[in-house]
Image: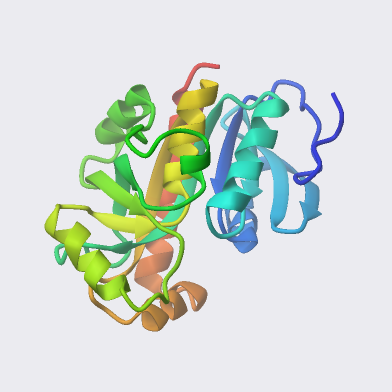
Amino acid sequence: METQAHIQLSPLENVKKAIIVGDPKRVDTIKHFLTDTKDLMFNREYKSILGTFEGENILVISTGIGAPSTAIAIEELYNIGIRTIIRVGSCGAMQQNIPLGELVISTGVVRDEGLTKKYVPEDYPGIPDPSLVHQAKQLSPDSHFGITRSHDGFYMPSNTETEALWSNFGILGGDMETSTLYVLGTLKGIKTLSILNNVVLYEADLNEGVNNLVNEAEVVANGEEASIKLALTLLKGESN
């Protein structure tokens, strides 16, 4: 098979599982949890490494921000033989009772972005693999499990009202990539799960929350580490 145009990868022997992250720097963070690591490619927002976790070969790749670049990554990962993908990402809480650094695990997603509507109608559900959700509940029972929302931006004038609307419906957190992962995963038969570290308190200042992530505030960094460990443990236990 030809090298994929954007991720610049070809099929890798005995590699069927991947972690996707938004930020290329998080790829380097995950590297510390793996052995026998090998740097692969770094093209545009797509930085990739290969490593081993307790005998399991795992590809780690960044996708950049938002649905379009995430969809490209998932399409091309599928083309090279990846069949299980876990997102290790961040979110902003949409409920008051979710502190910084706690994990939000999406059991379903509001598709409030534009890209997946090009694949399927708006009322098509975005859901993860049930077995991965079940295992995550056993491994991390204190995480927040529930519906999240994926969106296309932060700075529209109506964002405050929009978030209040969805918060009233019980939505736990917001990100920009989970809906793309879940819809494409279902369409292509990829097992998926999105594990999100809360980096912004509900109704708190966005810049403050993002700066906490950039500066690796201890509580947020601990949440990131917990999300990485959970994803790796899930992938180790998942059959190909």
The residue depicted at 44 percent of the width and 75 percent of the height is 210
Find residue 40 and report its image quarter. top right
The residue depicted at 76 percent of the width and 58 percent of the height is 44
- Give percent across and percent down for residue 195: 39, 46
Q: Residue furthest right?
A: 2
Q: Residue furthest top?
A: 239
The residue depicted at 44 percent of the width and 36 percent of the height is 182
- Give percent across and percent down for residue 156: 40, 75
The residue depicted at 35 percent of the width and 79 percent of the height is 157
Q: Number of labelled discs? A: 0
Q: Quadrant of the C terminus?
A: top right
Left/right placement of residue 184 relative to residue 157 reads: right
- Give percent across and percent down for residue 26: 58, 58
Q: Nearer the viewer, residue 47 or 219?
A: 47
Left/right placement of residue 220 relative to residue 239 reads: left
Can residue 228 be seen in the rendering of this structure? no
Find residue 223 and report its image quarter. bottom left
Q: Quadrant of the N terminus?
A: top right
Left/right placement of residue 134 relative to residue 209 reads: left
Can residue 106 be seen in the rendering of this structure? yes
Up-down relation of residue 196 to residue 54 (above or below): below
- Give percent across and percent down for residue 109: 32, 43
- How are the colours assigned in the image? rainbow
Q: Nearer the viewer, residue 152 or 189?
A: 152
Up-down relation of residue 219 to residue 192 (above or below): below
